[in-house]
Image (cartoon, rainbow, N blue to C red):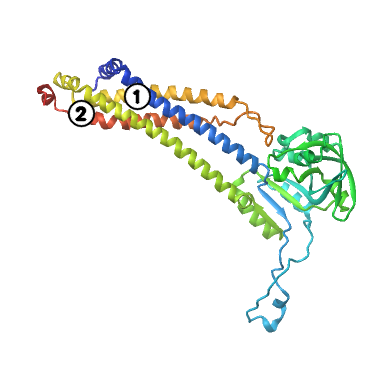
């Protein structure tokens, strides 16, 4: 029967008599785990921020009328050519309405769906912004601002003013930050917008919107949906887009296909709309995990080398232990215990160091004009990373300790005592 008290006492004695080697091995684990926690927390936090920047501005399903050529050309209706190969060149898009047919019934249907968190109508209009002699082309998006606040992160991107100010002003506008800078406009000023037909409407700036994406901030602004309907001279049922947020984003692809068939309209799911960005995000995460795991493996090799040298230094001690009645298994357990003690202590200290560095990074100031609402570096304090860190520390030290301890188990004490 294994006497664990004796084995652990011997392991402790070995570790304390070789403090330099013990400290070096422990610091190897500490550095590996600490670096892993710091790196993976910071990189996944940064990736999460970038994902939120794009994905939170993208609906799970976007419903709209797509301009495209007619699927059936006039020649298809000629019976004498139905068995022939028809080739038509220079097909032009068909003239169609931008508005969604039966938009309000579709909205009511979606809001009653148990898988839908919310559905918001939008009107996108191409306009010109006028301020003195300046005339800039852009988009004006009519929204139900309070629903947008509930379903997206639009409120986080309002750097001046508030959503409530837009809701309470039917002639208000949330002006894009790039537009405000180009036209030297601030909250409280007025900007005129002109439709393609030439009609001009004055709007009061009740807020400044900055998404952090220059191409959007330089052309896009928001106002109430009824305001855009009035500017375009359209009825209350005029809606060009419907944005849908789901309770389960995994259902987006299936629901988008069903909506296209059911309503005979274009429905784009979030995966299709952000395919390139999603690929880039996955690659960044893959690189993060690959570098992190490499750090842990390097720490494991360090422990292996140190324990291997420790066994060579303890050859006479091993011979004496075996000569006094300790079995090969007992000797192996002694060195395995040393490895696990090093792994446990080094791993716990590594978690503390990683957490401390993560807190420092999380509180470090991060100032950029592109993202004014983010004031510190993003860090992800996910508990799972800490569990992975301590598990890998114990696993790597177990493997690193097993190989040299197995060698110690097979050492012949007689050969060591004879000096051969």
Mark 1 lies on residue: 25
Seen in the picture, residue 33 relative to 217 is either above or below; the reply is: above
* Secondary structure under the numbered disc 1 in the rendered image: helix
- Which one is in front in this view, the residue at disc 1 or the one at disc 2? 1
Cβ–Cβ under 8 Å for marks 1 and 2? no
Tell me which residue sits at (35%, 31%) in the image: 300
Question: Is the C terminus in the top left, top right, bottom left or bottom right quadrant?
Answer: top left
- Compared across the picture, whether 40 is left or right of 57 comes to left
Crowding around mark 2 (Cα neighbors within 10 Å: few <14, some 14 to 19, many 20+) is: some
* Viewer-closest of 354 and 9: 354
Mark 2 lies on residue: 409
- Compared across the picture, whether 408 is left or right of 72 comes to left
First in sequence: mark 1 vs mark 2: 1
* Viewer-closest of 404 and 113: 404
* Secondary structure under the numbered disc 2 in the rendered image: helix
In the picture, residue 340 is in which quadrant? top left
- Most extreme residue toward the front, as rendered? 133
Crowding around mark 1 (Cα neighbors within 10 Å: few <14, some 14 to 19, many 20+) is: many
Tell me which residue sits at (46%, 27%) in the image: 34
Find residue 178 and report its horizontal and vertical position in percent: 75, 41
Indicate which disc residue 43 carries: none
Tell me which residue sits at (42%, 29%) in the image: 32
Seen in the picture, residue 218 relative to 105 is either above or below; the reply is: above
- Compared across the picture, whether 419 is left or right of 49 comes to left
Tell me which residue sits at (38%, 26%) in the image: 28
Find residue 354 and report its horizontal and vertical position in percent: 49, 26
Find residue 410 and report its horizontal and vertical position in percent: 18, 30
Q: Is any part of residue 175 visible from this angle?
A: no
Disc 1 to disc 2, C-alpha distance? 21 Å
* Viewer-closest of 318 and 90: 90
* Viewer-closest of 239 and 105: 239
Q: Is any part of residue 211 visible from this angle?
A: yes
């Amino acid at each position: 029967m294994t006497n664990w008290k004796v084995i652990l006492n011997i392991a402790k004695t070995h570790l304390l008599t070789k403090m330099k080697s013990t400290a070096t091995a422990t610091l190897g684990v500490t550095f590996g785990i600490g670096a892993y926690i710091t790196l993976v927390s910071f990189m996944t936090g940064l990736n999460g921020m970038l994902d939120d920047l794009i994905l939170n501005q993208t609906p799970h399903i976007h419903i709209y009328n797509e301009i495209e050529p007619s699927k059936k050309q006039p020649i298809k209706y000629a019976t004498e050519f139905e068995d022939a190969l028809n080739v038509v060149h220079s097909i032009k898009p068909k003239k169609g309405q931008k508005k969604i047919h039966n938009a309000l019934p579709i909205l009511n249907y979606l809001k009653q769906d148990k898988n839908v968190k919310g559905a918001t109508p939008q009107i996108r209009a191409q306009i010109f912004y006028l301020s003195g002699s300046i005339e800039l082309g852009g988009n004006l998006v009519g929204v139900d601002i309070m629903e947008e606040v509930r379903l997206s992160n639009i409120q986080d991107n309002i750097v001046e003013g508030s959503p409530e100010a837009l809701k309470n002003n039917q002639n208000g506008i949330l002006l894009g930050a790039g537009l405000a800078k180009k036209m030297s406009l601030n909250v409280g000023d007025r900007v005129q917008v002109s439709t393609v037909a030439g009609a001009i409407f004055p709007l009061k700036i009740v807020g400044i919107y900055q998404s952090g994406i220059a191409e959007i901030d330089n052309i896009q602004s928001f106002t109430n949906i009824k305001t855009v309907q009035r500017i375009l001279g359209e009825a209350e049922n005029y809606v060009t887009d419907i944005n849908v947020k789901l309770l389960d984003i995994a259902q987006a692809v299936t629901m988008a296909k069903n909506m296209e068939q059911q309503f005979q309209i274009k429905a784009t799911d979030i995966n299709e709309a952000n395919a390139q960005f999603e690929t880039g995000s996955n690659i960044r995460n893959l690189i993060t995990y690959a570098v992190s795991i490499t750090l842990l493996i390097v720490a494991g090799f360090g422990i292996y080398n140190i324990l291997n040298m420790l066994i060579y230094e303890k050859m006479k001690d091993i011979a004496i232990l075996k000569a006094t009645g300790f079995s090969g298994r007992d000797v192996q357990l002694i060195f395995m215990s040393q490895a696990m003690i090093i792994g446990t202590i080094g791993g716990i200290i590594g978690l503390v160091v990683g957490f401390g560095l993560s807190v420092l990074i999380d509180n470090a100031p991060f100032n950029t004009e592109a993202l004014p609402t983010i004031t510190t570096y993003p860090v992800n304090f996910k508990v799972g990373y800490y569990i992975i860190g301590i598990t890998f520390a114990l696993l790597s030290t177990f493997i690193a300790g097993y190989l040299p301890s197995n060698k110690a188990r097979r050492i012949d004490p007689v050969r060591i005592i004879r000096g051969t």
